């Protein structure tokens, strides 16, 4: 789902950068207010795991790639704002160190994966009754990937509409991104629920991190 430099119209990536920075600043503010000493290494380990998962990607069309995202897993363990902070940090490292996703496109990549992905997952979990927690996490994981890819496809289409030298025609971008990521989302759902089920058995204390790092009621799904 990573977008490379030069693919999006300037108006689109500048708008994406502005929106992403506002959300990221708020996320770090929220996380910083409730962070404990033991939370920092925990977040670092989670970030490393998601980082490795995201590095296993493959090209789709015109400079975009498909891969696992990890937003739903981060939301379950850290809450929505912690997830945004962690995934943004991962995207910065990927962009600056590994060239995976462009620097000018960092805002859009953050918007699609960190913000849309995390908030979509969190919204699904909030709407899911507690007795259906694991199915809800699976749906949340799928939605985080699918809706993030949908946002990316819309951005590609808008860029192409503004200037045909940028982006990809929506007739191509929408079915390609949404179709493939609807399948990738299934893999994300399986992996996410598997990891959560494993943690519940071997490290149940990890499941309380998200509740401790967010205001009361924000991580009921975890």
Image: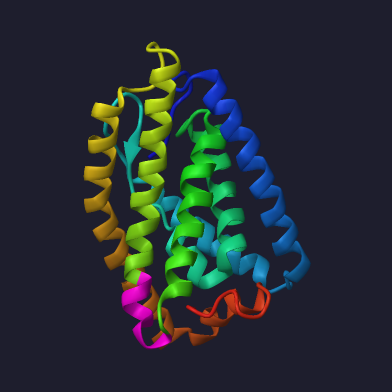
Image location (x, y in percent) of residue 18: 65, 35
Q: Using the image as rendered, state which of residue 171 and residue 218 is in the foreground.
A: 171
- Could you tell me which residue is drawn at 49 percent across and 71 percent down? 76
Q: How many marks?
A: 0
* Residue 156 visible to an observer of this rendering: yes
- Could you tell me which residue is drawn at 45 percent across and 58 percent down? 120
Quarter placement of the N terminus: top left
Q: Magenta segment: does it hold 135?
A: yes
Q: Magenta segment: does it hold 48?
A: no
Say above or below: 120 vs 126.
above
Say above or below: 38 vs 66.
below
Furthest-right residue in this view: 33
Which of the 4 quarters of the picture holds residue 218? bottom right
- Could you tell me which residue is drawn at 30 percent across and 64 percent down? 189
Say above or below: 6 vs 19.
above
Which of the 4 quarters of the picture holds residue 15? top right
Say above or below: 149 vs 135.
above
Image location (x, y in percent) of residue 82: 61, 62
Q: Is residue 147 left or right of residue 42?
A: left
Q: Is residue 197 left or right of residue 81?
A: left
Q: Using the image as rendered, state which of residue 140 and residue 105 is in the foreground.
A: 140
Image location (x, y in percent) of residue 211: 60, 78
Colour pattern: rainbow
- Could you tell me which residue is drawn at 41 percent across and 83 percent down? 129
Image location (x, y in percent) of residue 106: 55, 34
* Residue 104 visible to an observer of this rendering: no
- Magenta span: predominant SS is helix
- Specify start and end residues of the magenta stretch as a single range: 130-137
């Amino acid at each position: 789902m990573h977008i490379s430099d030069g693919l999006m119209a300037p108006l689109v990536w500048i708008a994406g950068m502005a929106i992403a920075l506002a959300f990221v600043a708020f996320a770090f503010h929220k996380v910083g207010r409730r962070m404990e000493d033991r939370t920092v290494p925990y977040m670092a380990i989670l970030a490393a795991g998601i980082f490795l998962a995201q590095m296993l990607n493959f090209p789709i069309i015109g400079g975009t790639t498909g891969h696992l995202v990890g937003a739903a897993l981060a939301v379950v363990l850290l809450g929505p704002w912690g997830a945004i902070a962690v995934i943004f940090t991962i995207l910065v490292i990927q962009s600056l160190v590994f060239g995976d996703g462009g620097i000018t496109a960092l805002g859009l990549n953050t918007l699609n994966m960190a913000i849309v992905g995390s908030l979509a997952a969190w919204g699904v979990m909030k709407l899911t009754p507690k007795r259906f927690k694991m199915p809800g996490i699976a749906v949340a994981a799928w939605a985080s990937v699918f809706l993030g890819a949908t946002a990316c496809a819309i951005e590609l289409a808008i860029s192409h509409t503004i200037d045909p030298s940028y982006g990809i025609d929506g007739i191509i971008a929408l079915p390609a991104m949404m179709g493939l990521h609807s399948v990738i989302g299934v893999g994300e759902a399986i992996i996410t629920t598997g990891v959560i089920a494993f943690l519940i058995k071997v490290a149940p204390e990890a499941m309380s991190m998200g509740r401790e790092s967010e205001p009361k009621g924000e991580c009921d799904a975890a």
